[in-house]
Image (cartoon, rainbow, N blue to C red):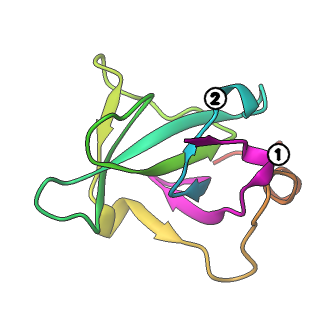
Amino acid sequence: MRKNVNKIIFDEIIVLGTPALFTDWRVNRASVPADMKMYEVRHADEDRGDPCQLARGIFVNFYGTILTLQPLLLNDCDYLDFDSSKDWGYIDDDPCATIAEFRSKYAGKEK
């Protein structure tokens, strides 16, 4: 089941140096605002707890969905491997939970 982004409470993260909203739900792509980019995240085969790759769509080992205001540079095969211990972190100080809060905090700001 894919959820409408307007009905999700998100976690705020930094992935590859870029602010993002994260949910462990699959998101209905049609509900994503036009100014936001959507990526799905994969976990490693051997460890279901650590995200390791993002892509436009994930079928196997789905970990969650992220939304960004800035595009992330994927490789020619439309995915990007990353190290969750260095490239993924949760924002604990005054985190955003909705798209409106996220836009208010980050719209128009450079990375």
Asked whether the viewer can see residue 93, the reply is yes
Please report the residue visible at 75 percent of the width from the left and 67 percent of the height from the top.
96
Label 1, on which residue?
Answer: 107
Q: Which residues are magenta?
A: 1-20
- Quadrant housing residue 69: top right
Q: Nearer the viewer, residue 93 or 25?
A: 25
In the rendered image, residue 14 lying in the magenta stretch gets the answer yes
Above or below for 13 versus 33: below
Would residue 75 be found to the left or right of residue 20 on screen? left
Residue occupying the far top of the picture: 76
Asked whether the viewer can see residue 109, the reply is no
Q: Residues within 10 Å of mark 2 (few under 14, many from 20)?
A: some
Label 2, on which residue?
Answer: 29
Would residue 1 be found to the left or right of residue 98 on screen? left
Kindly identify the amino acid type of the residue bearing the numbered disc 1. Ala
Residue occupying the far bottom of the picture: 93
Element under disc 2: helix
Q: Earlier in the sequence, mark 1 or mark 2?
A: 2
Q: Is there CB contact under 8 Å for labels 1 and 2?
A: no
Please report the residue visible at 72 percent of the width from the left and 63 percent of the height from the top.
9
Q: Residue 109: x, y in percent? A: 77, 47
Residue occupying the far front of the picture: 1
Element under disc 1: loop
